[in-house]
Amino acid sequence: MANNCISRWFLLSLEENIKSMSNAIMLIAIPIFFMLIFVEYLVAKRQHKEVYRLNDTIANLNIGIGNQVISVLTKGLIFGIIYWIYEHWAIWNIPVNVLSVFICFLLFDFIYYWAHRWGHKVNFFWGAHVVHHQSEEYNLSVALRQPWFHHLISFFLFLPLPLLGFNPLVIGGVSLFVTLYQFWIHTRTIKYMPRIIEFLFNTPAHHRVHHAINPDYIDKNHGAVLIIWDRIFGTFQAEKEEEVYGITTALETFSPVLANTHYYTDLWKMMKDLNWKQRIKLLFAPPGWQEGGRPVEELIKEVELDRAKYNPEVPLGFKAYAALQFVLILWGSVAYLSNFENLSLAHQVYFAALIILSLAICSGILESKKWVYFAEYSRLLLVGVSLNALYYFKYLDWFLVVLVASGIGLVLFYTWFSISLGKNYRELLLR
């Protein structure tokens, strides 16, 4: 009985340590990410490269915010499974030292290579991973364009690590390092690194190839930190021509919800005319496969490289309004992540849903979608009411301050949005 109590205490404390460490590091990393994005923008300007578009950048960052919000809700489940396997099924109890951490990193990076490769070669995984490749630009904001559900369907590939006996703290630390490493390789401002680094590690040049839809580049360079796995298993491709970015069939929307669901919706539609055997085959077939259709290799050769980028015309007032709303959503999301543990489960879920709704409407404004002009009025009111209710019941000392501030903000935003809408009513709503 005592041993069971100790085990449960160990698992709970370990889970809280990893979750706290992960949240703290990500919250520290966020301002650093944005500073580096700004630096990249300035460097690209000096290099006479246009690597950022406001609508595309906000779309990337909106999806990244959604990823963090959903991850904080689900990471407890994933970590709980890892702890349980480590506590009850580990073959060995591997001590934590420099050597074991290095071995864990090599194994993690190796598994990541295959998980990433299958993410491009298996429809079921590609449906989630495709989100990261949808942007038609290539810059540091694309690094933050992370899928909302991919970790839920691929984490089981990494379960051999706790089964072998690697401490979950080590696995969590290695995972965080691998994730942070890949931020800097999403840039066009760094051409090449020294030859030894290009040979061993994933670099901007290698990862530009990975994100390109040029026929020779598709499904190449799947490594996370190390590029040697691609060299060993025949998926390495050196950069030889200028890349065209995106996916073979352009998404043509900035909606974070559609970005994360459109491929599965397409698969569902395709399944309607198939039998059960064909449906299972479709789930595990490569993207582009169809029963009785042309080989995927032939389809790749016909990818259109000179297509126009998705760039809907939106009045300047709406662009500025959407940009400011994005900043406020970002601020609110950081506050949500910082105080997540202090919220009840109902508040955790409710405010996550409110953030996702706000992201969707913000992206809709950047596309002049008709429905957002009515949805935004409701969202602003809902945000104001929700904040005041939260502070009234949990932080009463600050309630009057929030009430006054949110009231002033609500009036200003209603006025700004209404004036912008009024100026463009005929163009935007009657077209």
Image (tube, rainbow, N blue to C red):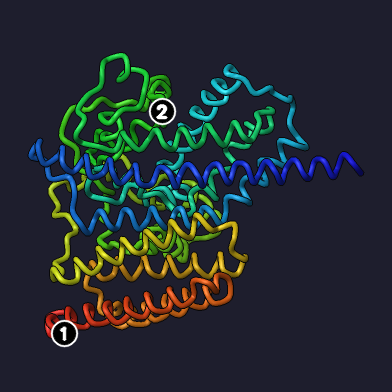
Q: Residue at x 25, y 43 (%)?
A: 139
Residue 382 visible somewhere in the drawing: yes
Q: Please, which residue is most extreme toward the top here?
A: 196
Which amino acid, by three-letter code, is at mark 1? Gly
| Nearer to us in this view, 111 or 216 | 111
C-alpha span from label 1 to label 2: 51 Å
Q: In this rendering, is residue 103 above or below 344? A: above
Q: Position of residue 361 (x, y in %)?
A: 33, 71
The secondary structure type at the circle numbered 2 is loop
Quarter containing the C terminus: bottom left
Residue at which label 1 appears: 422
Please tell me which residue is depicted at 32% across the width and 18% down the height of the picture.
197
Q: Amino acid at mark 2?
A: Val
Residue 298 visible in image: no
N-terminal-most mark, 1 or 2? 2
- Camera-near label (1 vs 2) is 1
Task: Give the structural element (helix, strand or loop) at label 1.
Answer: helix
Residue 102: x %, y % from top left: 54, 21
Residue 268, image x, y percentages: 46, 63
Q: Are marks 1 and 2 in contact (CB under 8 Å)?
A: no
- The residue labelled by disc 2 is 225
Quarter of image, res 418: bottom left
The x, y position of residue 89, in whole percent, is 76, 35
Q: Residue at x 31, y 53 (%)?
A: 60
Horizontal side, residue 17 vs residue 132: left or right:
right
Residue at (18% x, 27% y) in the render? 240
With respect to residue 266, does 288 lie above or below? above
Q: Quadrant of the N terminus?
A: top right
